Amino acid sequence: MTKRYWLLKSEPTTFSFDDLKTSSGKKTSWDGIRNYQARNIMRDDMKIGDLGFFYHSSCPQPGVVGVVEVVSKPYPDHTAWDKKSNYYDPKASPENPRWVMVDVKWKEDFKNFVPLEIIKATAKLGKMKVVQKGMRLSIQPVTKDEFDVICKLGRQKK
């Protein structure tokens, strides 16, 4: 089975990479996705063992802070039918979940934060989804080459 690569966005004020590292087992459910395209990626394309970038978004300096691993198959996102949740969806229920989530686990901290402006300025990353105008999906595919370039940037000594 071919490993795939992803970029997963989270606002650091909501859930940061440090929050993941201090979670039980350094693992969390990637819940609250309420975009059908992102949901379909999780449901249909993400597999156990896939790797992803943890990307801080909607903050003064967005960018990649480290690597996570997908450690579960998709399963119903129970926050959709929890009326107290920020992610409540009145059309969802345990019988008709509509939304899914996967579990991700901390894999690696980068020595260097890789900011969006560096990603944009790196020629080999010019076709990356995150730099394309209007691409706001919270889960995006990343090619193996893009993954390798960003890992190199994040791992290099300053």
Image (spheres, rainbow, N blue to C red):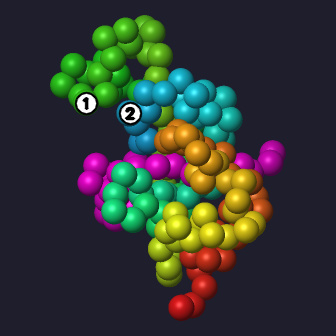
Q: Please rate how many residues cluster around mark 2, counting C-alpha atoms within 10 Å: few if below 14, some from 14 to 19, many from 20.
A: some
Q: Where 154 falls versus 105 (above or below)?
A: below
Q: Which mark, by number, is residue 86?
A: 1
- At 43% from the left and 61% from the top, the residue drawn is 62
Q: Which residues are magenta?
A: 1-28
- Dot 2 falls on a residue whose secondary structure is loop
Outermost residue to the left: 84
Looking at the picture, how far across and down is residue 10, in whole percent?
A: 40, 50
Horizontally, residue 54 falls left or right of residue 52, namely left
- At 55% from the left and 40% from the top, the residue drawn is 134
- At 58% from the left and 28% from the top, the residue drawn is 37
Q: Where 81 falls versus 122 (above or below)?
A: above
Looking at the picture, how far across and down is residue 17, in whole percent?
A: 39, 61
Horizontally, residue 22 falls left or right of residue 150, namely left
The residue where tag 2 is placed is: 32
Q: Is residue 102 magenta?
A: no
Q: Quadrant of residue 72?
A: top right
* Contact, mark 2 vs mark 1 (Cβ under 8 Å): yes
Amino acid on which the number 1 mark rests in the picture: Asn
- At 46% from the left and 23% from the top, the residue drawn is 99
Q: Nearer the viewer, residue 135 or 1?
A: 135
Looking at the picture, how far across and down is residue 128, in whole percent?
A: 67, 54
Amino acid on which the number 2 mark rests in the picture: Gly
Would you say residue 28 is visible in this rendering?
Answer: yes
